[in-house]
Image: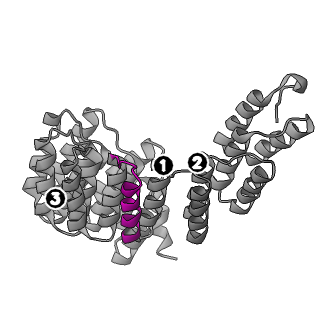
């Protein structure tokens, strides 16, 4: 590890810069080395030093070590601040030790430290991701009760939690509540609800949210379009999906690789192969390059339709871009032999893929 040699000229400020730099890269050994070197040079770590170290240890899940440093803060007579408590609480939330979260919350209050928005959002986010949305709602209500005004991000966290457990009507009520307090939802708020309704098969409700979004002059992201297009295609509503696809440019957006992949795979599924090829060519002309995931998905769709020659064309594109076939793609190639046409298919695929056909004859 490269450190300045003139340690005698280094003060807390310089050490803290070094600790922070290594902590950002999660280089824990280097951080602890500098931390030790401070003491050797007669400098006790200050609240900033401890805060950075505790945050790092909490982020990487070393909660016993983080709590040891926290105990050292107390021993040395330093006052832990809200940042230290938030780091520890986030760490314990991540590893599911909710009893420690409660203990630290109580200690915060005993020390006269008021929880901030970061604290509330951290706890709500972890509760929601664990399906404990009703507890997250209690935390949200406590935040409001304690005078911490919720922001859009806090509502988004809770709405997402309700969507994850399928309680779409509760999520919708939160959207209405935002308007009632003068808070304007952002594109992520709408996208969460659109995705939630789509996954529940409530496509018409999702379309209502899309219209409300546009009426509210909230510019959708391409992710919003992708969610809705995917839902419409899955629900067999291809024409509506195509209309939405065609309207992307009018909203000042351009389709991305996910958008094109959704449309192309649907075209292949219904046998519109020339149309799918044309759309792929148009995509690349528009400057959107196919990635490995998209090309593999196209190959699999074509193989499942028995369109081996076309699949070979897209396998060549995988090679040209130095991508590799995914395991599921390779499995479908190997399965071609079971159809008894291994030799015939060899002539239709690039030479490097002949080995896949030979595997099934062993």
Element at badge 1?
Answer: loop
Decide: is 22 above or below 137.
above
Pointer 1 local density, CA inside 10 Å: few below 14, some 14–19, many at least 20 = some
Residue 153: image location, x then y, percent: 36, 48
The mark that comes first in sequence, 3 or 1, is 1
80 or 260: nearer the viewer: 80
Give the structural element (helix, strand or loop) at label 3.
helix
Residue 95 position within the rendered picture, expressed as x and y whole percent measured from the top left: 59, 66
Magenta range = 134-151
Q: Earlier in the sequence, mark 3 or mark 2?
A: 2
Q: Which numbered disc covers residue 206?
A: 3
Counting from the top left corner in percent of width and height, residue 63 is at: 68, 61
Which of disc 1 and disc 2 is earlier in sequence? 2
Q: Residues within 10 Å of mark 2 (few under 14, many from 20)?
A: some
Q: Residue at x 19, y 64 (%)?
A: 234
Q: CA distance from mark 3 to mark 2?
A: 40 Å
Q: Is residue 356 above or below residue 274?
A: below
Q: Is there a contact, CB below 8 Å, between mark 2 and mark 1?
A: yes
> For mark 2, what is the residue?
82
Location of residue 321 in the rendering, given as x and y in whole percent from the top left corner = 44, 42
Tell me, yes or no, whether the two marked residues, 3 and 1, touch with CB atoms within 8 Å: no
Q: Quadrant of residue 19?
A: top right
**Left or right, 210 with reference to 147:** left
Q: Which residue is mark 1?
A: 116
Q: Nearer the viewer, residue 255 or 359?
A: 255
Task: Please tell me whether residue 248 is drawn above or below residue 347 in the rendered image.
Answer: above
Q: Is residue 178 left or right of residue 299?
A: left
Q: Is residue 154 located in the magenta-colored stretch of the structure?
A: no
């Amino acid at each position: 590890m490269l450190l300045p040699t003139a340690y005698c000229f280094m003060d807390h400020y310089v050490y803290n810069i070094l600790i922070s730099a290594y902590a950002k890269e999660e280089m824990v050994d280097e951080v602890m080395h500098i931390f030790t070197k401070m003491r050797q040079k007669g400098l006790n770590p200050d609240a900033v030093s401890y805060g950075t170290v505790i945050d790092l240890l909490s982020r990487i899940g070393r909660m016993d070590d983080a709590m040891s440093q926290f105990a050292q803060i107390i021993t040395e007579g330093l006052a832990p601040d809200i940042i230290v408590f938030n780091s520890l609480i986030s760490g314990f939330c991540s590893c599911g030790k909710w009893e420690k979260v409660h203990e630290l919350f109580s200690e915060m209050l005993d020390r006269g430290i008021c929880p901030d928005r970061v604290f509330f959002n951290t706890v709500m986010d972890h509760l929601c991701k664990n399906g404990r949305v009703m507890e997250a709602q209690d935390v949200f209500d406590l935040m409001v009760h304690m005078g911490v005004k919720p922001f859009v991000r806090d509502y988004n966290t809770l709405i997402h939690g309700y969507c994850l457990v399928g309680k779409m009507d509760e999520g919708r009520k939160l959207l209405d509540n935002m308007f009632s307090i003068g808070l304007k939802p952002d594109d992520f708020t709408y996208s969460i609800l659109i995705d939630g309704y789509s996954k529940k098969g409530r496509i018409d409700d999702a379309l209502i949210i899309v219209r409300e979004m546009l009426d509210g002059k909230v510019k959708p992201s391409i992710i919003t379009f992708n969610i809705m297009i995917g839902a419409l295609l899955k629900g067999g509503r291809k024409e509506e999906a195509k209309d939405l696809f065609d309207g992307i440019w009018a909203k000042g957006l351009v389709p991305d690789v996910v958008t094109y992949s959704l449309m192309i795979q649907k075209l292949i599924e219904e046998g519109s192969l020339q149309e799918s090829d044309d759309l792929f060519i148009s995509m690349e002309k528009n400057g959107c390059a196919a990635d490995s995931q998209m090309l593999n998905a196209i190959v699999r769709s074509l193989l499942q339709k028995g369109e081996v020659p076309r699949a070979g064309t897209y396998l060549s594109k995988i090679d040209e871009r130095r991508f590799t076939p995914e395991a599921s793609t390779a499995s479908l190639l190997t399965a071609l032999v079971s159809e008894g046409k291994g030799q015939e298919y060899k002539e239709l695929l690039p030479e490097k893929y002949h080995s896949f056909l030979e595997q099934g004859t062993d």
